[in-house]
Image (spheres, rainbow, N blue to C red):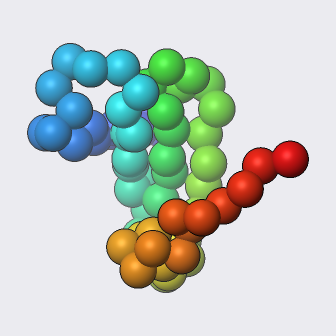
Amino acid sequence: MPVDWQKSSFSAEAANCLNIAAPASEAIKLRESDDPDVILTTTPATLGVFIRAAKAGRFDRLTYH
């Protein structure tokens, strides 16, 4: 089944855009425009938790080793 990918209107023609699709009510698919073959699948509830955490700043001080 083909997936109808959507891109934010804020992205314009820039690179590094997040694309999102909802082919079924229980699944959300995410991909990055520069690497469209890598697709993450999640549920609407889990994505909602992630978005709320990002808006709350919970990822602002992540460190990478």
All told, the count of numbered labels is 0
Q: Residue furthest right?
A: 65
Q: Position of residue 45 (x, y in %)?
A: 49, 81
Depth check: 11 or 61 in front? 61
Identify whether 43 is placed above or below 13.
below
Q: Residue at x 51, y 38 (%)?
A: 31
Q: Position of residue 59 (x, y in %)?
A: 56, 67
Identify whether 17 is placed above or below 58.
above
Q: Residue at x 45, y 74 (%)?
A: 57
Depth check: 21 or 17 in front? 17
Question: Residue 12, can we see it?
Answer: yes
Q: Residue at x 38, y 47 (%)?
A: 20
Question: Residue 26, can we see it?
Answer: no
Depth check: 7 or 24 in front? 7
Position of 48 with respect to 62 (left or right) is left
Q: Residue at x 16, y 26 (%)?
A: 12
Specify the quadrant of the image occupied by residue 16: top left
Position of 44 with respect to 40 (left or right) is left
Q: Position of residue 22 (x, y in %)?
A: 39, 56
Identify whether 46 is placed above or below 65.
below
